[in-house]
Amino acid sequence: MLRLVVSYALISRPTLAGTLALPFQPSPSVDAVAEQIRRTGARATPARIRVLQLLRDAPAALTHNEIESALGARAIDRVTLYRVLDWLAESGLAHKNTDAHRVYRFSAAAAGEHLTHVHFRCEDCGGVFCLAAAPPAAPALPLGFSLSRVDFDLRGRCAGCCAASS
Amino acid sequence: MLRLVVSYALISRPTLAGTLALPFQPSPSVDAVAEQIRRTGARATPARIRVLQLLRDAPAALTHNEIESALGARAIDRVTLYRVLDWLAESGLAHKNTDAHRVYRFSAAAAGEHLTHVHFRCEDCGGVFCLAAAPPAAPALPLGFSLSRVDFDLRGRCAGCCAASS
DNA sequence: CGACCAGACGCAACATTGTTGCAATAACTT
DNA sequence: AAGTTATTGCAACAATGTTGCGTCTGGTCG
Ligand SMILES: [Mn+2]
Ligand SMILES: [Mn+2]
Ligand SMILES: [Zn+2]
Ligand SMILES: [Zn+2]
């Protein structure tokens, strides 16, 4: 069975603040989130509002599964959640990334542009941590290739997982 | 449906040789491969020999699916192939990586150490290309984190996919 | 306000990749 | 040649993600 635990508390701990980007942000109001959605030209539905608000509150990128659990009772439909998440990513309101277990993780885009910093990916829990360091410049590409983005990923075990196994 | 096409020919083209690492290597004999397997202390079974030989012949990292197709008739069992591939990776004879479509790709380990160079990952076909550039050094980690590996991945569209859509 | 309708939703069914349990087989050892 | 035990093949399962389609509703306009 796949073990996918997000060390919520740990990620936003001040202990790591010196090297972690994206500090915790105050929760946005429902109206503000709805307005942000409408500005893209699309409809501000309850599903989109709740999910985007959840992402903006989250201290780390979340999986579809984690979001479904977080919504708890009166959860929205599984497929709708997939569509909402993809829509958020396409419309630029969220980032869609793959974690160390090859599962998609989503994070609110407003909080910071993930292309401007380096990431640490825990091979144990799958968590993604935003580090303060900037990624280096890309080397030259072979002829005919086109670049869309650069990822500098450090892999290993996060503090939480290291502590849990010692 | 998932489209997973490896541009075999393209990857080993001399056009790209200036910037691509891992040039094409001559095919190893069955006996040499079997001996390489036995040296790990495990049994040299037909499945392991055929798969490792295929990987050493391949100009690019292959998915489970591609390997199954390549073996064609008298294919080995799906599950056995998964186990052979995982064993090859664990025993150090092959590398196991994730492509842009979040599918595992396997490549023979002897041909070159992938930690010493940068990769280009095509977001269209999922192909992984080894570039000649070396990855930059890792920045400092937060306290308690442990690093196991660094990936510097360029993402975009490969020459084959760019040409196909123009 | 009430009707309208493109866009969003919910449901059911499906696809793909990867894993687990277990009995049967065969690679190596003696 | 027989014995041991790693490896195989099969069937069933699990997790993530997708597609098709009929129903509903958010935002708009009369
Ligand atoms: Mn980030
Ligand atoms: Mn490589
Ligand atoms: Zn972890
Ligand atoms: Zn491509």
Image (spheres, coloured by chain):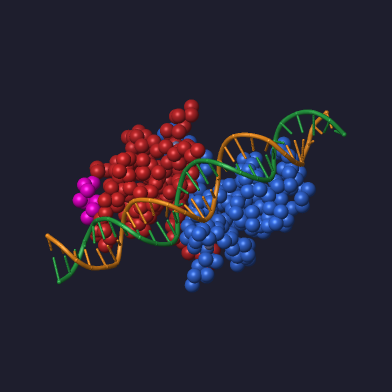
Chain colours: A red, B blue, C orange, D green
Q: Residue furthest top?
A: A166
Quadrant in the picture for residue D8: top right
User: Residue at left 22%, top 55%?
Assistant: A35
What secondary structure is the magenta-colored segment mainly? Answer: helix
Quadrant in which residue B25 is drawn:
bottom right
Looking at the image, which residue is at 40% across and 44% down? A65
Look at 46% across and 32% down and name the residue there. Answer: A162
Percent of width and height locating residue A163: 45, 29
Residue C28: horizontal and vertical position, in percent? 78, 36
Number of marks in the image?
Answer: 0
Q: Is residue B131 left or right of residue A9?
A: right
Q: Is residue A145 visible?
A: yes
Considering depth in this image, is B62 or B78 the residue closer to the camera? B78
Q: Is residue C20 above or below residue A103?
A: above
Q: In this view of the protein, can residue A40 be seen by the observer?
A: no
Span shown in magenta: A28-35
Q: Is residue A146 above or below residue C21?
A: below
Residue B88 x %, y %: 65, 44
Horizontal side, residue B114 vs residue A37: left or right: right
User: Is residue C16 or residue A90 the one in the foreground?
Assistant: C16
Residue in the picture at 39% in, 46% down: A64
Q: Is residue A74 left or right of residue B92?
A: left
Asked if residue A32 lies in the magenta stretch, the reply is yes
Residue A96 image position (x, y, % from top left): 40, 52
